[in-house]
Image (cartoon, helix red, strand yellow):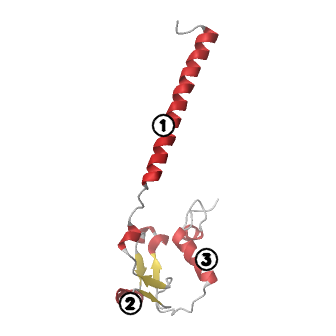
Amino acid sequence: MLKRTRRNFRAGKAGFAPCPRRLAKTLCEMSHPIQKDPSIQLKDGCEWADHEDCIIGNRSGIESLKSACIEALEKGEYYGSDLGEYVGVKVIEDSWFEDPKDSKGVKVGNAVIAAVLFTLLGLLIIGAYSVMKFVYGLFT
């Protein structure tokens, strides 16, 4: 059995699942290799418990991210090789973040399905009662 070490955590071994964001980025890098500046370090903090849900990086990486964010705000998007593990920054509409609402047809369909299921449950209970009454003579 493997020890629960940081290296095994990053590799997804010893009961730890690999970070889904890191796995997706690794697959993306395999299909789109990018020449990166080794002095720029910018990563997703999900690999470390101390930095989970954070973007982490050295000073030059954070400054590159800042300039990329400014350009994305001006032009709508920015793509470059100076963002460490990332390939770009995009500005998207607020509506993208809203939870989708069910349409009226979906709500009606769900109500019909619920009514049919409750009817079948009622018939099942009545049938079970009738069988028990007939076979065992119970409830008399």
- Kind of residue at badge 2: Lys
* Neighbour tally class for label 2: few under 14, some 14-19, many 20 plus, Cα within 10 Å: few
The amino acid on which the numbered mark 1 sits, given as a three-letter code, is: Ala
Question: Quarter-wise, where is residue 24 in the image?
Answer: bottom right
- The quadrant holding residue 20 is bottom right
Of the image marks 1 and 2, the number of the one nearer the N terminus: 2
Residue shown at the point (41%, 70%) measured from the top left = 96
Looking at the image, residue 82 lies above or below residue 14: below
Residue 68 vs 111, above or below: the answer is below
Of the residues tagged 1 and 2, which is closer to the observer?
Answer: 1
* Residue with the mark numbered 1: 115
Cα gap from disc 1 to disc 3, whole angstroms: 46 Å
N-terminal-most mark, 3 or 2:
3
- What percent of the width, then of the height, locates residue 64? 40, 90
The residue tagged 3 is 27
Q: Quadrant of the N terminus?
A: bottom right
At a point 43% along the width and 83% down the height, the residue shown is 89
Mark found first going from the N terminus, 1 or 3: 3
Q: Element type at marker 1? A: helix
**Disc 3 element:** helix
